[in-house]
């Protein structure tokens, strides 16, 4: 019972914390540009405002357009429910493995790319085409880095991997997985639509990817999409934190251990958000046709990590 | 039980002739021939399900003075599996055909269509049950010829004729290799019977074995359409009437998988390690190039045909891993990889059948297959759109549909290759798995393009604007397959158990199903992973409904204003301003330009000044390297040789008689020289 409650708490934590992490990166950017930036409460009231607003919907839109925000949100929630956060359990982690995790995210993306074409505008088509192209290139890198980690842990489920990495000594983890960390970091940047792959704050057609797809959305649909996107970003950061810096994750449900775990988790996630923000501040957006090179780097890093395991052995 | 099979055969024969009774009445001929096809398929489904579920086999032998041994048919679980997918897909295709062929009724001879259709199905049924190499080749040829006549059914169109010719040439090249493989077996065993081949498995010399393997791989590979033997497939499959395309892509190419599996697991005994590697190489090449070329297609049916090449590749990935594990003496892993391949065989039959029927509906509703002139069909053809979307999601391997299940199994099968120790550890296997993921993502891109450009947005042409929804029987045909896409996912543990018997029947290795299936879960044989399709679907449904209900409860009914799409303040958004299919795939064309070698030509016409343009023409082409570098030189070589040979051909009968005379003299001299 306590395990179930704890799993539910972790899941809700991901959902509630997601806008805050996004705020943190926005705030960082604002400070770096000598602006004050929004307060923490702003991101939540933005969402709430969007949720209550009326919607303007294109006359060309079909039911796909109406279904997409829900499918996207459900897909992201299903993926998030598989991720252990504070302890080695998760809400629905037993249902599937990393492959399912990747394809649940693909489900939402599939619908988003369709909905972008649904309104019959050039913007939508452009965003849809670019998003599907880049995600096709990101997906093999993401899968391969999961496989590389899976071979080290001898399991393919997220729960099992995190349990394994939190049990072995951290130096060994670092030694075997640092290359994979690089790969997964690049994929995280691509998946959450951040500079240098995509620019979350642009509305210029030359540079838009994610924003171009959701240009026709407003009101509660837009709120669902934005929130889903933020949850996805936090899910990736959580994976980075728990897989590569697995300190403090408990296998038990003791209260003091959990408190420590929560504190460490927050530190880890915000530090990683700092890294993402730092990269965003210090780099320019890549040209669309240079982004594949970056994703190829991620792919090569995972291959090298596998090669390392093959040569040195599986570690412990 | 066997009665059902005899009924199926009888009904197919009757159906083949029935059309001719009503040759003057297209409508009646249509109903008679396709109605009988539906009945026959139902009988076939019952028969094959009976065998699969009861685990008994069926044998029929016709003794008599046959020159090459008794005519013997048998169906164990392995054959019954293929019988099932043939019968099931032809059930859906035949129901669909009742409505679809209505437009052929006036201009075309529907009786002839029905005749070839029935004999095409009949030949496939016999191919997967006959137990004698000689008759196998006979039925194989019958299947090829019947499908050839179906490909050129609309022979008024020159594309259909040239595609038919290419198909005829390539399929006979393939048949020649299969014949060679069987003749080598015959020379070694002195019999054409499959049972004798099975008994003799493992008694071949290594060289002979390798030669037979290569001949079988090339022969069956041609029929399956693996790259680089695929060139006929994207030409021929789209030319046939759509319900036949569904059968050709859905099941005919699977008969080649059947034949290949017979050779690999029954006739040839122990396999050297490199066989599996060769099959894996061919498989990954087909998977990647197949989908990359599908992405560049703007013709809906050609796009689907290229994607069939991809899916045959995925099936062969499972087969290749099974062979690798067989060599390593890991029967559990081999059985699992075979199950993955079988699962993808049935899944691909279902969703590719569905997509081809959907393309047929689009063709019949709009009279065009060109994605560039479609658009907005989701409003004109809501049922077709919904079914096509289900097919598109399934083929893109999205949960909770069936495509994801077999893709997951194939992923696990590939990853198992890395888990062994020492020589059993294959570095390539996780790379292949990630490339499979790459192909899956590209397939999603391809089908977002096909569905998004074709069915969403605004109509790009008059064809699409005046589209109409298809008739009830066509909707029913697609509906059956769409429901199966979901059913094959939710019932995955049960399907897996059935496929376990199929795999056992083929390879003989005992696969303990308790290790692979536990209640709702599919378990990886190394216990590294588990996955429950049913729970996944429930969780997705739960989150979907939960979000919608919660939003409604907290925020009340949504307030919506409908307005035009955002036009950047310049009124007058036109359908032509939408993204095109060519434009959609442009980024990938550029990223993979080393492969596509794209060329483009822009022609501008102006009235004396470059600012006064009157017309602009744009042409973009990609290169198919296999066609350009292998087949074109080959065709040129044949043409050159034929031209040389023409010089001794004058057309005078006296000259030919003297050629024969000279040949005879030379032969006599040669033989006389040998005997002395």
Image (spheres, coloured by chain):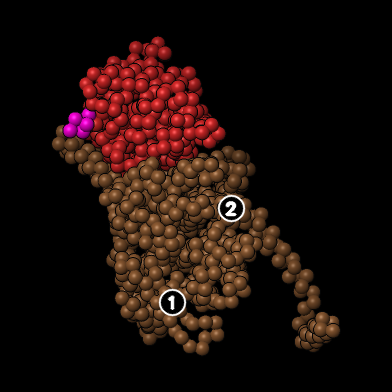
Chain colours: A red, B brown
| Quarter of the view holding residue A272 | top left
The answer to which image quadrant residue A246 occupies is top left
Which residues, given as a range, are shown in magenta?
A1-6
Query: Mark 2 or mark 1, which has the lower sequence index?
Result: 1
Residue drawn at 39 percent across, 69 percent down: B76
Q: Secondary structure at mark 2?
A: helix
Residue A223 percent across, percent down from the top left: 27, 31
Is any part of residue B656 visible from this angle?
yes
- Mark 2, chain letter? B
Front-most of residues A209 and B305: B305
Same chain, labels 2 and 1? yes
Q: Which residue is mark 1?
A: B73
Please give the chain letter of the residue carrying mark 1: B
Left or right: B57 as drawn, with respect to A44: right
Residue B274 badge: 2
Residue A226 x %, y %: 31, 31
Is residue A12 in view? Answer: no
């Amino acid at each position: 019972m306590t395990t179930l409650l704890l799993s539910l708490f972790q899941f809700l934590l991901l959902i509630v914390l997601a806008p805050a992490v996004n705020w943190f990166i926005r705030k960082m950017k604002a400070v770096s540009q000598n602006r004050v930036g929004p307060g923490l409460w702003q991101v939540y009231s933005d969402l709430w405002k969007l949720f209550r607003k009326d919607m303007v919907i294109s006359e060309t839109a079909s039911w796909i357009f109406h279904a997409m925000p829900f499918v996207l949100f459900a897909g992201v929630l299903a993926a998030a429910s598989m991720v252990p956060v504070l302890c080695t359990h998760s809400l629905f982690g037993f249902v599937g493995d990393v492959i399912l995790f990747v394809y649940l995210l693909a489900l939402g993306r599939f619908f988003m790319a369709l909905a972008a074409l649904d309104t019959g505008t050039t913007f939508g088509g452009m965003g849809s085409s670019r998003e599907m192209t880049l995600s096709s290139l990101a997906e093999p890198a993401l899968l391969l880095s999961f496989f590389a980690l899976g071979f080290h842990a001898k399991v393919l489920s997220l729960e099992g991997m995190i349990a394994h990495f939190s049990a072995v000594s951290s130096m060994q983890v670092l030694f075997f997985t640092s290359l994979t960390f690089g790969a997964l970091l690049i994929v995280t940047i691509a998946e959450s639509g951040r500079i240098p792959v995509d620019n979350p704050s642009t509305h210029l057609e030359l540079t838009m990817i994610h924003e171009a797809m959701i240009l026709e959305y407003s009101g509660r649909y837009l709120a669902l999409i934005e929130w889903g996107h933020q949850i996805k970003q936090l899910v990736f950061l959580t994976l980075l934190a728990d897989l590569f810096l697995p300190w403090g994750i408990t296998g038990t449900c003791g209260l003091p251990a959990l408190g420590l775990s929560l504190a460490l988790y927050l530190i880890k996630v915000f530090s990683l958000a700092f890294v993402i923000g730092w990269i965003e501040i210090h780099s320019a957006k890549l040209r669309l046709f240079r982004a594949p090179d970056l994703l190829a780097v991620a792919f090569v890093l995972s291959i090298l990590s596998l090669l390392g395991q093959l040569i040195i052995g599986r570690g412990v | 039980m066997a009665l059902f099979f005899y009924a199926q055969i009888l009904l197919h024969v009757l159906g083949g002739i029935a059309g001719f009774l009503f040759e003057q009445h297209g409508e009646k001929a249509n109903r008679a021939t396709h109605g009988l096809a539906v009945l026959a398929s139902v009988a076939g489904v019952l028969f094959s399900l009976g065998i699969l579920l009861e685990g008994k086999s069926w044998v029929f032998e016709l003794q008599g003075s046959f020159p090459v041994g008794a005519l013997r048919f048998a169906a164990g679980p392995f054959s019954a599996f293929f019988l099932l997918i043939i019968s099931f897909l032809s059930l859906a295709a035949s129901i669909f055909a009742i409505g679809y062929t209505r437009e052929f009724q006036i201009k075309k001879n529907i009786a002839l269509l029905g005749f070839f259709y029935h004999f095409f199905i009949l030949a496939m049924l016999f191919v997967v049950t006959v137990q004698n190499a000689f008759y196998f080749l006979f039925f194989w040829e019958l299947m090829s010829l019947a499908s050839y006549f179906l490909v050129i059914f609309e022979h008024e169109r020159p594309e259909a004729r040239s595609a038919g010719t290419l198909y005829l040439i390539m399929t006979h090249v393939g048949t020649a290799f299969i014949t060679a493989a069987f003749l080598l077996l015959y020379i070694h065993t002195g019999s054409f019977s499959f049972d004798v081949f099975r008994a003799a498995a493992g008694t071949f010399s290594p060289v002979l074995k390798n030669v037979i393997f290569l001949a079988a791989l090339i022969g069956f590979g041609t029929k399956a359409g693996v790259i680089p033997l695929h060139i006929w497939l994207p030409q021929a499959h789209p030319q046939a009437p759509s319900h036949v395309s569904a059968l050709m892509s859905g099941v005919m190419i699977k008969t080649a998988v059947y034949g290949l599996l017979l050779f690999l697991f029954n006739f040839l005994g122990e396999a050297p390690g490199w066989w599996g590697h060769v099959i894996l190489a061919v498989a990954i090449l087909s998977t990647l190039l197949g989908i990359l070329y599908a992405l560049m297609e703007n013709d809906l049916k050609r796009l689907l045909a290229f994607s069939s090449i991809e899916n045959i590749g995925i099936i062969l990935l499972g087969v290749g891993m099974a062979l690798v594990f067989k060599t390593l003496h890991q029967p559990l892993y081999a059985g699992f990889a075979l199950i993955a391949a079988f699962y993808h065989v049935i899944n691909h039959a279902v969703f590719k059948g569905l997509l081809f029927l959907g393309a047929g509906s689009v063709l019949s509703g709009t009279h065009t297959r060109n994605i560039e002139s479609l658009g907005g069909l989701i409003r004109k053809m809501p049922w077709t759109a919904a079914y096509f979307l289900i097919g598109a999601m399934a083929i893109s391997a999205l949960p909770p549909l069936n495509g994801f299940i077999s893709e997951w199994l194939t992923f696990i099968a590939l990853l198992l290759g890395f888990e062994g120790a020492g020589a059993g550890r294959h570095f390539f296997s996780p790379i292949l798995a990630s490339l499979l993921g790459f192909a899956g993502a590209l397939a999603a891109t391809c089908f977002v393009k096909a569905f998004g450009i074709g069915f969403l947005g605004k109509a790009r042409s008059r064809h699409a604007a005046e589209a109409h929804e298809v008739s009830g029987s066509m909707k029913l045909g697609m509906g059956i397959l769409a429901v199966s896409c979901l059913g094959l996912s939710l019932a995955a543990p049960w399907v897996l158990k059935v496929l376990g018997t199929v795999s056992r029947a083929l390879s003989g290795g005992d696969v303990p199903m308790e290790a692979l299936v536990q209640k709702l879960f599919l378990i990886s044989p190394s216990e590294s992973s588990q996955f429950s399709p049913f729970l996944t679907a429930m969780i997705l449904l739960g989150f979907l409904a939960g979000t919608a209900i919660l939003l409604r409860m907290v925020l009340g009914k949504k307030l919506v204003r409908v307005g035009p799409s955002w036009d950047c303040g310049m009124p007058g958004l036109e359908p032509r301003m939408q993204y095109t299919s060519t434009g959609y795939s442009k980024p990938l064309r550029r990223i993979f330009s080393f492969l596509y070698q794209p060329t483009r030509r822009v022609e501008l016409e102006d009235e004396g000044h470059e600012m006064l343009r009157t017309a602009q023409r744009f042409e973009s082409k990609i290169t198919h390297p296999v066609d350009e570098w292998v087949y074109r030189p080959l065709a040129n070589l044949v043409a050159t040789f034929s031209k040389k040979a023409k010089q001794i051909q004058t057309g005078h009968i006296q000259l030919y008689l003297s050629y024969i005379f000279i040949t005879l003299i030379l032969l006599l001299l040669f033989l006389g020289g040998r005997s002395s």
